[in-house]
Image (cartoon, helix red, strand yellow):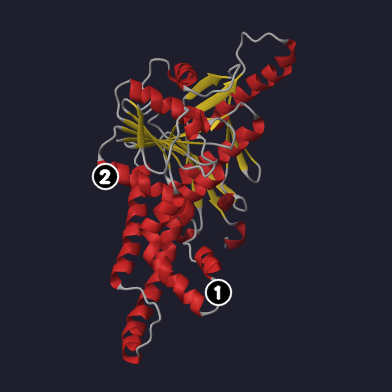
């Protein structure tokens, strides 16, 4: 099964593009399911269908679903949460407050990810299209397996050990304090195992691709750059930039002239910001995108005759790696056959700008590197390797 995740700043048109992509895949004969993980669901509006928390077939080869986070949480976290609610309630915390504070950090959003593993194991579909939440929330989701594993290793294992001591004491004293049984802890292990499995699926470029949806507006592009950098940091493969709502060339109304010129500049900037990633474009339509006919038109502009499920980029435009316990990092930027004499490097606190001959590349740095200094920049294996270190830790 191929997994295609669309993410981007709120309001850029992710839902319409997800629906159009899924429709095109289905009409090419691929069994396709499209799911919305955005709490402000609008997938049903885009497809002009009433959708629910379970998948439903809306056309031949096409299923759609608006994920219900609460249902998924009850399934994977319910028994342990009931124990924790009972524990808090006995200490005077109201049930409704106890329910809120006993949610594993990020799990309410992370419940959406569990469906990816479910559909992969189900092996019913050829393509899963994910209409993801806006970028900040999506990044929290994609980092969730790392965060929750830390939480599990350091908190739950301690709690489970305490439970093994308390449970027999309670039996002797005939106390009724709620202590989770081994089946409940097994449910927790299965939850973390599932999240780890989702991480494996989403970081396997043969299976999954993240596609960034942008509008040709500078603020949107800058946020998308940051998203792209963090996706690289977590190992998620991005294979395309989908530029939505480009004013068509045949629009000659003077009212749009300034905006068209600004968009042309921003399209050039997108090329600088994302390197060799394919850039697919869709125009600004004269009316709202919704319903099957307009979704087909959108897919025509984006993909032409191309199969959207195909992997669109095999390389890596840049990668950030930690150099062990030294506290140093290296930013690797493939530059092919560039001559080092043609390369210029400029650095601000949160950005690196590279000039290679007439071309420019702009890379947003993650927060981890903001306060680090550049130690050196060297060519090796067709990469420019830029090493960062913490100046106050140097000898």
Residue ranking furthest to the bottom = 173
Element at badge 2?
helix
- Does the rendering let one see residue 101? yes
Q: Nearer the viewer, residue 197 or 284?
A: 284
Q: Nearer the viewer, residue 248 or 277?
A: 248
Report x, y in % for residue 157.
37, 72
Residue ranking furthest to the front = 50
In front: mark 1 or mark 2? 1
Name the image quarter holding the N terminus. Answer: top left
Identify the residue under disc 1. 93
Give the left or right position of residue 129, taking residue 267 as reference: left
Binning the other alpha carbons within 10 Å of mark 2 as few (below 14), some (14 to 19) or many (20 upward) gives few
Asked if 343 appears above or below 84 in the picture, the reply is: above
Question: Residue drawn at (37%, 77%), measured in percent from left and top?
Answer: 179
Question: Residue drawn at (46%, 25%), measured in percent from left and top?
Answer: 278
Binning the other alpha carbons within 10 Å of mark 1 as few (below 14), some (14 to 19) or many (20 upward) gives some
Report x, y in % for residue 180.
35, 73
Q: Nearer the viewer, residue 386 or 307?
A: 307
Question: Residue drawn at (53%, 20%), measured in percent from left and top?
Answer: 282
Q: Which mark is residue 267?
A: none
Report x, y in % for residue 260.
67, 17
Name the image quarter holding the C terminus. Answer: bottom right
How far apart in space, not on screen, are marks 1 and 2 (Cα)? 40 Å
Question: Residue drawn at (45%, 36%), measured in percent from left and top?
Answer: 383
Identify the residue under disc 2. 121
């Amino acid at each position: 099964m191929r997994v295609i995740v669309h993410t981007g700043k709120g309001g850029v048109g992710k839902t319409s593009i997800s629906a159009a992509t899924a429709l095109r895949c289905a009409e090419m004969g691929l069994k396709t399911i499209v799911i919305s993980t955005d709490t402000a669901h609008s997938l049903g509006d885009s497809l002009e269908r009433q959708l629910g928390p379970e998948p439903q077939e809306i056309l031949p080869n096409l299923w759609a679903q608006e994920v219900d986070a609460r249902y998924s949480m009850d399934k994977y976290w319910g028994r342990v949460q009931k124990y924790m609610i009972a524990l808090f309630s006995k200490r005077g915390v109201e049930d409704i407050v106890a329910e809120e504070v006993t949610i594993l950090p990020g799990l309410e959003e992370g419940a959406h990810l569990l469906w990816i593993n479910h559909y992969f194991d189900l092996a019913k579909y050829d393509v899963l299209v994910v209409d993801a939440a806006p970028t900040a929330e999506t990044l929290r989701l994609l980092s969730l397996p790392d965060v929750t594993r830390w939480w599990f290793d350091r908190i739950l294992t301690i709690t489970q050990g305490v439970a093994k001591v308390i449970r027999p004491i309670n039996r002797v004293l005939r106390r009724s304090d709620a202590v989770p049984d081994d089946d409940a802890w097994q449910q927790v292990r299965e939850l973390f195992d599932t999240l780890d499995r989702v991480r494996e699926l989403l970081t396997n470029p043969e299976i999954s691709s993240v596609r960034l949806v942008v509008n040709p507006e500078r603020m949107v592009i800058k946020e998308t750059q940051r998203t792209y950098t963090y996706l690289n940091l977590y190992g998620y493969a991005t294979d395309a930039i989908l530029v939505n709502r480009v004013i068509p060339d045949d629009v000659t109304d003077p009212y749009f002239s300034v905006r068209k010129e600004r968009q042309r500049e921003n399209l050039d900037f997108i090329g600088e910001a994302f390197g060799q990633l394919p850039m697919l474009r869709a125009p600004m339509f004269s009316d709202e995108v919704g319903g099957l006919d307009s979704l087909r038109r959108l897919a025509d502009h984006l993909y032409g005759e191309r199969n959207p499920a195909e992997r669109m980029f095999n390389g890596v435009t840049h990668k950030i790696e930690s150099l062990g316990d030294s506290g140093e990092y290296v930013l690797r930027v493939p530059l092919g056959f560039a001559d080092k004499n043609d390369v210029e490097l400029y650095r601000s606190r949160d950005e690196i700008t590279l000039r290679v001959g007439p071309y420019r590349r702009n890379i947003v740095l993650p927060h981890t590197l903001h306060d680090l200094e550049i130690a050196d920049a060297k060519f090796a294996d067709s990469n420019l390797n830029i090493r960062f270190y913490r100046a106050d830790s140097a000898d």
